[in-house]
Image (spheres, helix red, strand yellow):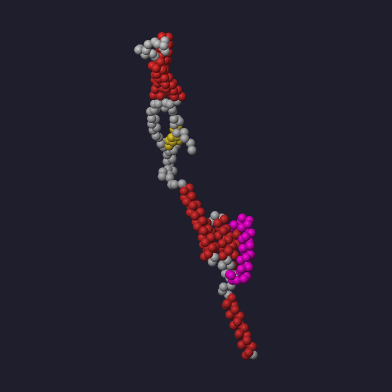
Amino acid sequence: MRKAGALLALVALLVSSTAVAAGPGQGDVAGDPAPGSPVAIKRAKKHFQTALTSYKNGAYREAIAELQEALRFDPNGKDLVYNLAVVHEKLGELDQAIEQFRRYSQMETDPKEIERVEKTIKRLEGARDELRAKEQAATPPPTERPPPKPDEPAPEPELRTTRVVIPPAEKGRLDAFTYGAAGVAGVATVVGVVYAVRAVSTRPGSDEATGPNSTVFELQDRAQRAHNYAVTADVAFVIAALSGGATALLYFGRDKEASPPTRIAVDRTGVRLSTGVAF
């Protein structure tokens, strides 16, 4: 009897020791296996498969919930952390994605993989900063005018006026008429010079006498031709003078080409000047 009693006491001691050892640490939730145990790893895989299906169907929030549940069973599953970061990036939650990628980088041991993830983190940080800058730029600045009191009507915005000074028109227009008159003057001057030279060279001298090689008829013919040349030269010089005067009158007597008209548009915010130039 004493041996049987001792045996029962030993069995009771072993059972109580086993219960104490298995009590704390078996799982955070009653009935859950210990994180990282073979049973927990199997459950983590099931949650991962469910997350993968949700991700393919575009249910990103459900995929995040399943991945977080899988991480509860397998806290050392670095691939689960990586996938969680990818889904957060898909949703545009850049802060959460950066946090999970950093967590994955701390769990990874491959230097090349760590370098690749660090580049991804820098890319996401740049995108996040750019997005914040755009949001700040799109925020309208606070109005300087205080809001009107309830019993006072809102004041009408004042029109801002400006004075437009039109400069005096400049003289000197160059167009087809001016160039045409100048061309006629130039041609007439050249013709006058040519015929004046021919008249001087053709006219017989006062001491030139008749002889075997120069008859009186030849001298008379040369004198007549010299006279005709001189008349032509005089007419050409007169035309040149008239054309030159017309050129000066056409140039200095008229305004320059008019620039595109200036339009003044008045609205409730102020005066805008437009010179007709469009971009």
Q: Residue at point 63% right, 85% down? A: 8
Foreground residue, 175 or 244? 244
User: Number of callouts in the render?
Assistant: 0
| Residue range of the region highlighted in magenta in the rendering | 34-61
Q: Position of residue 179 (x, y in %)?
A: 44, 24
Q: Is residue 141 visible?
A: yes
**Residue lying furthest front in this view?**
212
Q: Which residue is at the front of the view, 173 or 277?
A: 173
| Vertical placement of residue 254 versus 230, above or below | below
Where residue 21 appears, as percent x and y from the top left, is 57, 77
> How far across and down, in percent of the image, does residue 99 sit?
52, 61
Front in this rendered view, residue 202 or 117: 202
Residue lying farthest bottom?
2
Quarter of the image where the N terminus is located: bottom right
Q: Can you say whether 120 is above or below 218 in the image?
A: below
Q: Residue at x 59, y 79 (%)?
A: 18
Left of 25 or right of it: where is 255?
A: left
Magenta region, main secondary structure: helix
* Image vertical order of residue 269 relative to residue 121, above or below: above
Residue 205: quadrant of the picture: top left
Looking at the picture, how far across and down is residue 9, in whole percent? Answer: 61, 85
Q: Is residue 254 above or below residue 210?
A: below
Task: Confirm whether residue 235 shows in the render.
Answer: no
Residue 46 counted in the magenta span = yes
The residue that appears at 61% across and 55% down in the rendered structure is 58
- In the picture as drawn, the residue positioned furthest to the left comes out as 207
Residue 219 occupies quadrant: top left
Residue 239 within the magenta-colored segment of the rendering: no
